[in-house]
Amino acid sequence: NYMEPWSKKHKAMCRANQGGISHSLSNSFAQPLSHAELINLTLARGDRELVDAFECHSLVYTPNGGSRDLREEIAKLYGPAIGADNILVFAGGQVALQTAAFALAKNCHSITFTPGYQSTVESPAHTGGESTQIRLRAENGWQIDLAEVRAAIRNDTRYMVVNQPYNPAGTLMGPELQADLIALADAHDIRILSDEVYRLLEHDPRDRIPAMADAYPRGGISVVTMSKPWGGCGISVGWAACQDLSIKQRLVDVQYFGTACPSRASELQAIMVLRASNTILEKNLGIIRHNFCLLEKFMERYSDLFEWVPPNAGAIAFIKFKGPLTSEEFGNNLAEAGISVKPAYCFSDEVTEDIDFFRVGYGEEIMPSALNALVAFVERHKTAWLAKTRGTVENLS
C-alpha cells in the first residue's frame, strides 16, 4: 500500500526556506562519528588487523543477513541465549522494521502505538494487514496503558510494535510494565517487535530494561541501528535479534527479495564501532547529559510557554508550545528564522490537541548554538505570544 512519508512536508518546508536551516534541532541521533575517528579508536586498541581488513577487503557478496564476524560482535550486546545465529543484519534499522512487518504482519491483525516514528506506527498497515493504533498521552507520561492493549486484542492479533525508549518523547517504560506487556502478549500468542534504537542511551543506566529479544524468548524481536546510540548513521547497518529461529527464518525469506547482502565496508566499520562501544557511548552520553541540562534550563525559564514530560533516555524530547500557534505554525515560523524542529505531523497522520507537540534533538555538539538561536527567537516573540494567549483566555471567560 502506498503511504506518503509524514516527514515529507517537513523536509519540503525546510528546503523552501530561502535562507536555509542554520540551526538544526531536528536530528535524533547521537554525535556523528567520522571514519578517521573510527580508525584511530581501532588502532589505539591495537586492532591493526581490523584496519587492514577494511583497507584490503574483497568486494565479493557478503552472506545474506550479514557476515558471521559482525553477527558475533552484535550478539555480545545481549544475554547468553542470543548468539550469532540469532542475529540478522540489514542495511539500516528502517529496512529491518519493514522486513519484519512483511514477514509477520501481512495476514493478521497488529497493534501499534501513536504518535511515533512512522515505520513503527504504520509498517503493518503498509503490508496490507489490519492494524489498530493506540494513542499514547502526555498526561500518562507517554506510557502504554495495558487496559487499552487488552481491549485492542482480537482473535487474529499476532503482531505488536513498540518503541522503547520512545520516539519522539525520549521516555522509557519500567521493567514491571515491560513484563506485564510480555505476559499479555504471550497469553495471546502475539509477537512483539521492539524498536530499541535508543537503547544504551538511558541517561541513568539503572533505568535500562532488558532487550525484548532477551526478555521474551518465544516472541520477542529487538531492532537496533548504528545511527542512534553510536552516531554511525552513514554506516547504514541495523539488525534484528530474536531467540526463536523460526521467526528469524521468516525474516530471512522476506529479506531475500530486498537488500539481502550488506556492504562489507559497512560491516567492518560496524565491527570497529562495536569494539569501541564503551568509549563511544561514554562520549555520546556526556554530550547528551550536558545538552539535556541546557534544555532543562530552557524549559524552566520559559515554563509559561512550554511544557513536557522530561525524557530519561535517548537524545530527543517532545515539547508542547502553550502559545497561540500549533506545532506546525510554530515549526514554520522557526524555519523562516533558520531553525528546524519536528512538528507533530511528523509523528502522526492525524494531529489533535493532545499530541500537538514538537520534537527536538539534543545529541550533537552543535545543539547549544541551535538552542541559543531558539532562545533568541523566543525572546523576540514571547511578549506578543503571551498577550495573545491571555486575550484568548479572557475571551473564553
Image: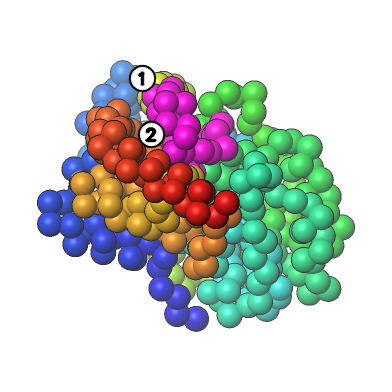
Q: Name the residue under label 2.
A: 363
Residue at figure coordinates x 81%, y 45% from the top left? 180
The image's mark for residue 315 is none
Residue at figure coordinates x 49%, y 68% from the top left? 349
Residue 1 is one of the magenta-drawn residues: no
Residue 97 visible in the current orientation: no
User: Which element is circle 1 on?
Assistant: loop
Q: In this view, does 112 lie above or below 325?
A: below
Instruction: Judge left or right: residue 44 versus residue 93.
Output: left
Residue at figure coordinates x 77%, y 58% from the top left? 148
- Observer-side mark, 1 or 2, equals 2
CA distance for labels 1 and 2? 26 Å
Residue lying at the far right in this picture: please name it.
187
Q: Where is residue 13 in the image (x, y as percent from the top left)?
A: 26, 61
Q: Is residue 18 above or below residue 283?
A: below
Q: Count every numbered label the image shows and give the total.
A: 2
Q: Name the residue under label 1.
A: 45
User: Which of 392 and 357 lies nearest the eye of the viewer?
Assistant: 392
The type of residue carrying mark 1 is Arg
User: Which of 64 and 109 lies nearest the eye of the viewer?
Assistant: 109
The type of residue carrying mark 2 is Gly
Q: In this view, does 310 lie above or below 251?
A: above
First of labels 1, 2 by sequence position = 1
Residue 287 visible in the current orientation: yes
User: Which element is circle 2 on?
Assistant: loop
Residue at figure coordinates x 59%, y 24% from the top left? 205
Q: Give the range drawn in magenta.
A: 292-319
